[in-house]
Amino acid sequence: MADTQSYDAIIIGSGFGGLYALHHLRDQMGLNVRVFDGAGGVGGTWWYNRYPGARVDAPSSPFYAYTFSQELVDEWEWTETQTAQGSVLAYLEHFAERFDLKKDIQFETWVNDARYDEAAQRWTIETDTNETASAQFLICATGALFVANMPDYPGIKDFAGECYHTGRWPHEKVSFAGKRVGVIGTGSSGIQSIPEIAKEAEHVTVFQRTPQYSLPARNRPLRAEELTGYRENWEELRTSMCKRGGWPFATNRRRASDYTPEERHAIYEELWEEGGIHLSINSFVGVMTDKELNEEVGEFVRGKIREIVEDPETAKKLMPDYYFGTKRLILDNGYFETYNRDNVSLVDLREDPIEAFTPSSVRTKHGEHPIDMLVLATGFDAVSGSMLKLNPKGRGGVSLEQKWGERFDNYLGTAIAGFPNLFMIHGPGAPGVFFTMPLGGERTTAWIADCISHLREQNLGAVEATEDAEASWDREINEIADHTLYPLADSWYMGANIPGKPRQFLGHLRGSQYFDRLIEVADADYEGFDFEPTHSQSA
Ligand code: NA7
C-alpha cells in the first residue's frame, strides 16, 4: 500500500454537489482538497444515467445549473427547455475544465472504507486502487440517486439476453432494433425511455407495478431572447429561486374555492397545455395538502390518460390511484401516446405479477412474455443508499450501518452524531430533490465551508452534531411532511420502494425555509453542534 496522502478535505463524488464543493473549498477557501470518484468522469447521476430519453425532470434550462457565476451563466448555451442528459453532462465537463477541477479529482477510484480517527480528529479512507488518504474533513457528495435497485425475481440471474439498469446504462450505443424488449418500472426513467425504445424495438412489453401521473414536458428549443432575458436578470432570478424553493418565478396563489368546478377545469386544461410542473405548482394553493383538491387534479390527469390512450383496457391499467404528486411527478415526451403503437403492450403487475424469469422470457401469473432484452428502470435505494454503501465508521468504530439500522438520524441533512467532521451534501432530511439540486448543493456547501472556517478560526479540532439536535431535527422534518399528503404514498421519498428499508420521509419539503434554518443555526453559534478543541497540531 502506498503512503497515506494528507489533505484538508476529501470529497467523495464528482457530480453537481462534489464538483461545486471542490471549487468552493479549494478556490474560495484555499483548502487542500482531493476528490475521489468510482466513475470514469465527472457528472455523478448524469454520468451514469445515459438511457435513451434521459432528461431533467424539473424546471430546467437554464435553472438546473450552477447559479453562482454570472460569467458561467453568460457563456453556456442551453438549447432546450427540458435539458437532455448529454447536455447536462457536457455542461458539467465544461464546468470542470473552466475551473480547472480535474487535476484534483481521482476517477475510477472507489472508496472502500472511511474511518474516523478520534485521536487525530481526521478521516482516513482506503480505495480499491490500494491507496490511503487522510483529511480533517470528509465531504460526502455521494448522490441521492446512486445505488441501483435490482429486483430479485426468481431466475432473473439466469436471464440470458442483454440486461441493463437505466441507472447504469452502457456508454456504447444500445441497439433495440429487431428486439423484443421487456421494461420493468414506470418511474421517470421508465417513462422517459419507453417511448424512445419503442421507436426502434420490434416489441416492448412494459411491466408496471404502479401506474403513474405523468405530465407533458412540452420540451422545445429555448429561444435566444429567453436565454438573454434570463442572463440579464440573473441575480434577481437567483434570489427568487432561493426564496421560492428553487423555482425562479412567482406561482399562482389562487384559492380553489373562489372558482366553480368548470372554471377550475379550464385552468387545469390551460396548465396541461403549458406543460411541465405547472399543473402542480400553478393551479391552486393546497394541491399537496388538501385531499379533495388533490383528488380533483388527479382525476383531471386520469381523464387525459383516457383521452390519449385508445385501448380502454390499457387506459384502465394506466390509471394512477394514489394522491397526485405524492410520488415524484414525471414529465414525459409522448409516454401515454406510446401505448397506441402496435409494438407496445402493458402488463399490470398488480393483477398479473411476475413469478419467475427463464433464460428467454418473463413468466407472469397469467402468461409468458418472450424477450431478448431486459431494461430495469427500477430506480434506486434513494438518498440514504449511497451513504450506507460508503458505510463510514465513526467514533468507537461504529458504522453508519449500525447507526442507521432503524432510522436515518442526522442533523440538518448534513451532519451525523458520532461522525465528527463529516458532512453530507443532499443527505436524508435535506431538501435534495425538493429543491433545484445544483443550487441546493451550492448553498449547502457554502454553509459547510462557513462551519469549517469557524472551526479553524477558533482553532478547534472537530465539529459534531448532538443526538438531541438529531431528534428535534427529525421531528421538524416530519412535522412539515405530515402537513402534506406526501407521507401517504408508497414512494421512494418514504423509502417504500426498497424491501426492508425503514419508512421515513427522506426530504425537507420547504427548501427556502431550510436554508434560513442553516443560517439561524450558524448565527446561534452552531446550535446543535459540539466543537472539540484540537488534540494535536501534527496532522
Ligand atoms: P423510480 O421513480 O423509483 O421508479 C422505479 C420504478 O420501478 C417504479 O415504477 C417502481 O414501482 C418500479 N419497481 C421497482 N422495483 C420493482 C420491482 N421489484 N418490480 C416491479 N417494479 C418495480 O426510479 P426512476 O429511476 O424512474 O427515477 C428516480 C428519480 O430519478 C426520479 O424520481 C427523478 O427524480 C429522477 P413502484 O412505483 O415502486 O411500485
Image: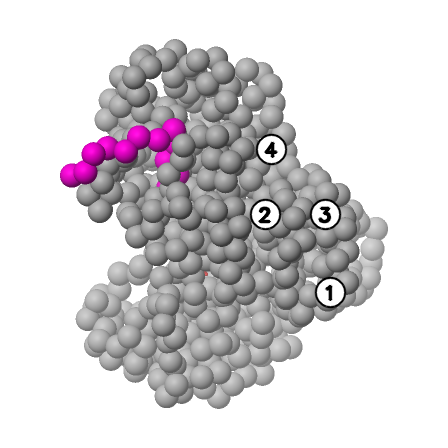
Find out if the beta carbon at label 1 lies less than 8 Å from the nearest ligand 1 atom: no
Label 2 environment density (alpha carbons within 10 Å; few <14, some 14–19, many ≥20): many
SS at badge 3? helix
Work out whether mark 1 precedes mark 3 in sequence or the reverse, and give the earlier one.
1
Any magenta on residue 479?
no
SS at badge 4? helix
> Amino acid under label 1?
Ala
In the image, which disc is placed on residue 515?
A: 4
Percent of width and height locating residue 197: 45, 78
Is 104 drawn above or below residue 292 in the view shown?
A: above
Residue 373 in sight here: yes
Q: Circle 1 is placed at which residue position?
A: 224
Please tell me whether the stretch drawn in magenta is mainly helix, strand or loop.
Answer: strand
Task: Quadrant for the N terminus, please.
Answer: top left
In the image, which disc is placed on residue 66?
A: 2
Q: Are marks 4 and 2 in contact (CB under 8 Å)?
A: no
- The residue located at (39%, 52%) in the rendering is 146
Q: Are marks 3 and 4 in contact (CB under 8 Å)?
A: no
